[in-house]
Image (spheres, grey):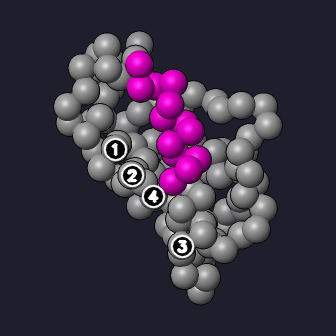
Amino acid sequence: MGNYVRFFSTISAEASYLQYCILELYMSKVRALSLSYINNAGYKLHPYPLVHLSKLLKMKESDLEVLCNACGLETCADEMENKLLPTKQTTFCCPKEGFQSYNFMGLEQFER
């Protein structure tokens, strides 16, 4: 239904190890779709802070920056060196090499 925040919050709060393993195959695709939503729906004059977005997508900020770049989106930094995602970029695309797997913040007990 497009509610990526609820998707990741539910996984974090309720997923068993087996459910996590099954869903792990789809998480990067959902994250990329989320980036597409934010890129298209965001207000152009206000870039989206990566630190906030990384919490919503349950991933490290550095991994999120890699995902943004893989999806053709550029990131920038403000005067305080906070990483930002400018919206309304026309270069969004799904990674041609496929999706990389990123750690899921909130389920560290399942990570090896």
In this rendered view, identify the residue nearer to me: 3 or 15. 3
The answer to whether mark 1 and mark 4 are in CB contact below 8 A is no
Choose top left, top right, bottom left or bottom right for residue 95: top right
Foreground label between 1 and 4? 1
- What amino acid does circle 4 point to? Leu
Foreground label between 4 and 3? 3
Residue under the image location 78 percent in, 31 percent down: 97
Which residue is under mark 1?
7
SS type, badge 4:
helix
SS type, badge 2:
loop
Foreground label between 3 and 2? 2
Q: Position of residue 29 (x, y in %)?
A: 56, 39
In this rendered view, identify the residue nearer to me: 7 or 73. 7
In the rendered image, residue 27 lying in the magenta stretch gets the answer yes
**Magenta residues, start to end:** 22-34
SS type, badge 1:
helix
SS type, badge 3:
helix
Question: Residue reaching furthest front?
Answer: 1
Which residue is under mark 2?
1
- What amino acid does circle 3 point to? Ala
Q: Is residue 90 left or right of residue 80?
A: right
Which residue is under mark 4?
53
Foreground label between 2 and 4? 2
In the rendered image, residue 98 lying in the magenta stretch gets the answer no
- What amino acid does circle 1 point to? Phe
Structural distance between the alpha carbons of marks 1 and 4: 14 Å
Which residue is under mark 3?
41
Q: Residues within 10 Å of mark 3 (few under 14, many from 20)?
A: few
29 vs 2: above or below: above
